[in-house]
Structures are given as structure tokens and as C-alpha cells.
């Protein structure tokens, strides 16, 4: 297999006195859909935030395409998040004052695309995700499934190399969740984007090429290795 596109090594992160990551390591390859599963509080979202450059780990390294994200200045991280990373959150986090088309166009506008061209591209992505006709509606005027598909369009409109999806179906019913995951995986495979999918749902994880489980801040494989090492030591 080729070298990983994104790597986190021995990541530690605490929120106050509460440890969230305790040495987690993970690799994501170009074009791969990787599901990170685990119970609530296992550190899944914290792992995603560290890998996406949203949060800096307390220790450990995060490397993307040869760059150490944990050492980059915020300006460079912001550029990566606008151009090469796309992020989808559980509740979409659309800007409530903006229409659907303007929410999707926003990353393009921030990257310097002229307004009319940005809105035209945004409309094309809304159609691709099956929410044509919602262009002028604001988030509060759409169903949960529609709003989440708008969020997906916003995350993918810039053609990112990595999509970070944090419980993207957690606020949806099963049918809407399946529609969102079908749209996400189809578009990612079509564009060649890698996807880091955070979920606690086995049915959603089944959309991925590979699944790893986070338990108490470390990947399950690491837990097993630690237990085996301790057994040998005894």
C-alpha cells in the first residue's frame, strides 16, 4: 500500500483534567474511507479535531502530505481547512442567516472565487446531493436530512482531498442517514477524496473500507498489543 496521506502518531489530548486521547495512532490513505467507531466519550471527536488541525494535541504528531499539522501556524491550517479539508459535523453547523446556496458558496468565496461563479458551483452541488429547489431556503426552513446534505455539499464544493465527517447521521432518522451516507460515499469515490468517518453506528461504519475502534483514547489494536505485552512481561 502507498504511504498514508494523513497520519496521527501517539496522540495525547486532555480536556482540563480529563484525558480524551491516550496515545492514539491512525493512518488514512488517499481515496480510503475509514470509520472510527467507539462509545460516547471514547475520544472519537477529539481525534478528528486533532487530525483536521482544529485542535492541537498535547503531544504526538499529525502529518498530512508531508507537513506536520501540529507545528503549522494557524494561518496555514486555516488555508488547508478551506482548500484541502472538508468537515461535516453531526448538526451541520450551517450559518442560519444564509440560504442553502450561500452556505455552500461560502468556502469558495473565502478562497477568492467570484460571487456569481461561486453561487453557480454551489447550485450544481446542491443538485448533485438531491436538494435542488432548496437554494433560497435557510437552514431552519429545511428538514434535518436536507440540511445535512447541504452541509455535505459545502464540505465537498472545494474538491477537498480529505473529508472529516463527525457523526454526520447522528441527528437523522435511518432513511435520511442512509441517503446522506450514500451521497457522501458516492461523491468521495467519484472524486478520489479520503474520508475519516466518526460514528457509533455499525450500519454507518459498514459504508467504510476499513474500521478501527477507539477505546479509552487508544485504538483497539493498541489496547490488544498492550495487554499482550503485559502478559509476556508477567
Image (cartoon, rainbow, N blue to C red):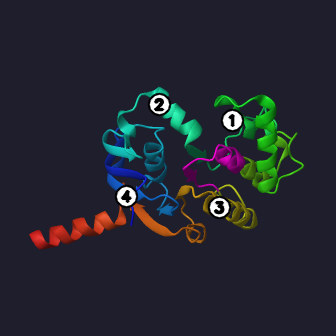
Label 1, label 4: how far apart the Cα atoms are? 30 Å
Can residue 6 be seen in the rendering of this structure? yes
Q: Secondary structure at mark 2?
A: helix
Alpha carbon distance from label 2 to label 1: 17 Å
| Range of residues picked out in magenta | 151-168
Query: What residue appears at the point 77 percent right and 42 percent down from the top-left corner?
Result: 122
Looking at the image, tell me whether mark 3 or mark 2 is earlier in sequence order: 2
Name the residue tied to disc 4: 3
Kindly check if marks 3 and 2 are in contact, taking CB atoms under 8 A apart as contact.
no
82 to the left or right of 121: left
Q: Position of residue 137 (x, y in %)?
A: 86, 41
| Residue at which label 2 appears | 76
Give the mark, 2 or 1, whose residue is nearer the N terminus. Answer: 2
Give the SS element for disc 3: helix
Q: Residue shown at 70%/63% (left/top)?
A: 177
Find the distance from the CA under tag 4 to the CA under tag 3. 21 Å
The answer to whether 214 is drawn above or below residue 78 in the figure is: below
Residue 135 spot, x, y in % from top left: 86, 43
Instruction: Identify the residue under disc 3.
Output: 190
Labelled pair 4, 3 in contact (Cβ < 8 Å):
no
Q: Nearer the viewer, mark 3 or mark 2?
A: 3
| N-term mark: 4 or 3 | 4
Q: Do tag 1 and tag 4 residues touch (Cβ < 8 Å)? A: no
Viewer can see residue 16: no
Classed neighbour count for the residue bearing mark 4: other residues with Cα under 10 Å, few (<14), some (14–19), many (≥20): few
The residue shown at (48%, 34%) is 77
Between tags 2 and 4, which lies in front? 4
Mark 4 or mark 1, which is nearer the start of the sequence?
A: 4
Amino acid at each position: 500500500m502507498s504511504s498514508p496521506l494523513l497520519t496521527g502518531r501517539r496522540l495525547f489530548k486532555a480536556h482540563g483534567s480529563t484525558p480524551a486521547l491516550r496515545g492514539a495512532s491512525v493512518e488514512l490513505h488517499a481515496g480510503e474511507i475509514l470509520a472510527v467507531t467507539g462509545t460516547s466519550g471514547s475520544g472519537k471527536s477529539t481525534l478528528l479535531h486533532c487530525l483536521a488541525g482544529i485542535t492541537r494535541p498535547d503531544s504526538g504528531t499529525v502529518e498530512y502530505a508531508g507537513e506536520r499539522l501540529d507545528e503549522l501556524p494557524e494561518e496555514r491550517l486555516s488555508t488547508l481547512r478551506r482548500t484541502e479539508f472538508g468537515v461535516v459535523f453531526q448538526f451541520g453547523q450551517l450559518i442560519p442567516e444564509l440560504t442553502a446556496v450561500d452556505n455552500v458558496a461560502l468556502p469558495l468565496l473565502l478562497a477568492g472565487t467570484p460571487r456569481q461563479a461561486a453561487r453557480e458551483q454551489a447550485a450544481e452541488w446542491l443538485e448533485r446531493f438531491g436538494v435542488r429547489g432548496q437554494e433560497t431556503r435557510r437552514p431552519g426552513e429545511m428538514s434535518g436530512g436536507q440540511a445535512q446534505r447541504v452541509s455535505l455539499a459545502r464540505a465537498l464544493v472545494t474538491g477537498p482531498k480529505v473529508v472529516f465527517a463527525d457523526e454526520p447521521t447522528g441527528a437523522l432518522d435511518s432513511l435520511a442517514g442512509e441517503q446522506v451516507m450514500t451521497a457522501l460515499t458516492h461523491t468521495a469515490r467519484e472524486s478520489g477524496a479520503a474520508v475519516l468517518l466518526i460514528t457509533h453506528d455499525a450500519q454507518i461504519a459498514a459504508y467504510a473500507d476499513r474500521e478501527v475502534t477507539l477505546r479509552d483514547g487508544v485504538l483497539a489494536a493498541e489496547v490488544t498489543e498492550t495487554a499482550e505485552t503485559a502478559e509476556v512481561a508477567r
